Image: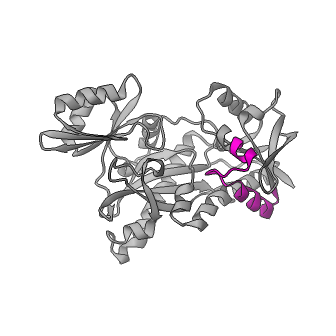
Amino acid sequence: MNRVGIMLDWGIMQKGMKGYKSYERLTHYVKIGKELGLEPVFFHPFHVLAGDERVHGYFWNGSRLIPRLVQIPRVIHNRVLTGDARARGVIQRLSRKKTVFNGLVVRDKRKVHQMLWKNPQIRMYLPHTVPYSGEQLKQFLEKYRVVYVKPSIGSVGIGVARIERLGNEYHFIASKKRKTMSLKRLMSVVRTWVGGKRFLIQQGIHLARYEGKTFDIRVSVQRNGEREWAVSGMVAKVANQQNKLSNLSRGGRAVPLTTAIAPTIPMDDQKGTLDRIQEAAIVIAKQYAHHFPSLADLGMDMGIDDKGHPYLIEVNVRDQRYSFYKAGEKAMFKQTYRHPMEYAHTLIHEGKKPKKQLA
């Protein structure tokens, strides 16, 4: 049986060793791998030995991960999201010697926006986005009723501030902060909020609503066994009324996308809306992968307006996938594990054949 490497975050590995559950369903890798004739070897970059040929790998024994010293598999699915220089160095070295998909990429949201903007097909899906400055914020507040200030690098809604213009006053919502203030006071608060870090400013889209609350859409876009980009699943994330964030870790909740769009999009238009979201997601994935060919597993946050037009909010290079599980979309949830495993299977068996150019 061929082996495939599954490189996971340190915390996930520690939980697996103790037999604890996490958002990574290790059993899905194992079961799907068995169907495909693949045995997953779980490890973190710190488990790789000097020389990058052997690893203290871990195998699922039915209840927990157990260690075994083995050769590093030739194909590795990278699920690690870290800023640790040492870990990133190991991933970089492995990427030169092995086939590592979803390797190191630019995650800076502003740079990703610039990459995507180069493709005219994609511009209709991109909200107006610029690097943060006081002057730019003033211009955005004059032009748009809702504006977001968010970290250039970040995830799960941490550090995101929503600003709503209410006449001559402004409503500032971030995490547990909810304040209404003058423009002068707002500029001071945002300046302190940003500090010396890199932030960007983004136009707030007038998103469709479900039960009176805005929602966005998590779209899992992955390469499949044919090495083509495909949508593995789509699920709605309904915003928390307190902080207006849809991230599940920030109080949002997941519901099936068909449930969320039903009150807004007429029945006859629903399939067309779903098709447009998928088409947008795939063309965006192809453009991002044009700059980083190792990409194979993306989680996009997208929104639709009340007419069903899709907009990209941001691209996540390590989709945690549990929004599908929380929404009860178990088939989609499992598909988000199947596609990467099928892709790995293809890479392993095409190893001795000439490689096709990735789109």
Tell me which residue sits at (82%, 48%) in the image: 352
Q: Residue furthest top?
A: 196
Residue 72, located in which quarter of the rendered image? top right
Residue 237 falls in image quadrant:
bottom left
What's the magenta region?
13-38
Residue plotted at (45% across, 37% down) = 109
321 is within the stretch colored magenta: no
263 or 89: which is nearer to us? 263
Residue 119 appears in which quarter of the rendering?
Answer: top left
Q: Residue 189 at what x, y percent from top left?
A: 27, 29
Q: Nearer the viewer, residue 70 or 295?
A: 70
Q: How many marks?
A: 0
Q: Please indicate whether residue 331 sits to the left or right of residue 242 in the image.
A: right
* 357 relative position to 174: left or right: right
Q: Position of residue 217 (x, y in %)?
A: 44, 57
- Foreground residue among 251 and 182: 251
Residue at 56% x, 49% y: name it: 319
- The picture places residue 175, in percent across and down from the top left corner, at 37, 41
Q: Is residue 73 visible?
A: no
Q: Is residue 177 left or right of residue 277?
A: left
Is residue 151 visible to us here? Answer: yes
16 falls in the magenta region: yes
Q: Quadrant of the N terminus?
A: bottom right
**Furthest-bottom residue in this view:** 268
Q: Is residue 232 above or below residue 89?
A: below
Locate residue 83, reporting x and y percent. 58, 30
